[in-house]
Image (cartoon, grey):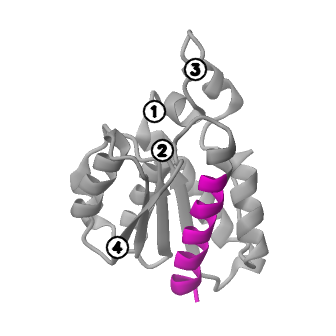
Amino acid sequence: QRVQNLSDAFIKQGFGILMMDLLTEEETEIGKPEAGGGTPDDWASSFDSDMLSERLYDSLDWVRDLPEAEGLPIGLFGSGPGAWAAFAVAAVKPVEVCAVVASALTPGEPLHSLARVKSPTLLLAGADEGGEGSMTRTCFAALSGRKRMECVAGLGRAPGRDELRATEAVARFASHWFMEYLR
């Protein structure tokens, strides 16, 4: 539901979007923890980040070949492992990727690769000062291009009322960032 709410918010702001999951249904099932719990982003972290990046890279090439996308600026939004895929694509396609928004950053990826990201990047962290917040601050320091970090109350928490508010805040921050850099 969170992804659909973000998608709806971007469409209301006038953005064209391609919403995709970087894992197949089968891969998502394989990566689920046996005990249940966790989120799809947690499950995806068990997959090769190069594979996720390659899929996003291929998708960007596919979009670029669409006549209706000709000349349009591209922004990437990624959460968890999808954020790392967005960073990887932005690093190798700096002219094509005009802006990046990343949330729910997961540890374990090489931070030195962030120095190659030149696209304006907005990082969104949970308002708590726990692990995700510190990971986001570490990533923020590693980025070399134009960057900003915002804390969002309720981001990364269990589904419920706080999650809906957090999703609305993420959509608001991301929309403003994209409006600024996708002109």
Give the CA distance from mark 4 to mark 2: 18 Å
The type of residue carrying mark 3 is Gly
Span shown in magenta: 165-183
Mark 2 or mark 3: whose residue is earlier in sequence: 3
Give the CA distance from mark 1 to mark 2: 8 Å
Give the CA distance from mark 3 to mark 1: 14 Å
Camera-near label (3 vs 1) is 3
Pointers 1 and 4 in contact (CB under 8 A)?
Answer: no
Dot 1 crowding, Cα within 10 Å, few <14, some 14–19, many 20+ = some
Mark 1 or mark 2: whose residue is earlier in sequence: 1
**164 above or below 40?**
below
- Where residue 21 sits: x, y (%)? 65, 44
The type of residue carrying mark 4 is Lys
Prevailing secondary structure of the magenta residues: helix
Name the residue carrying label 4: 147
Residue 164 in the magenta stretch? The answer is no
Residue 80: mark in rendering: 2
Under tag 4, what secondary structure? strand
Q: Quadrant of residue 106?
A: top left
- Where residue 6 sits: x, y (%)? 69, 58
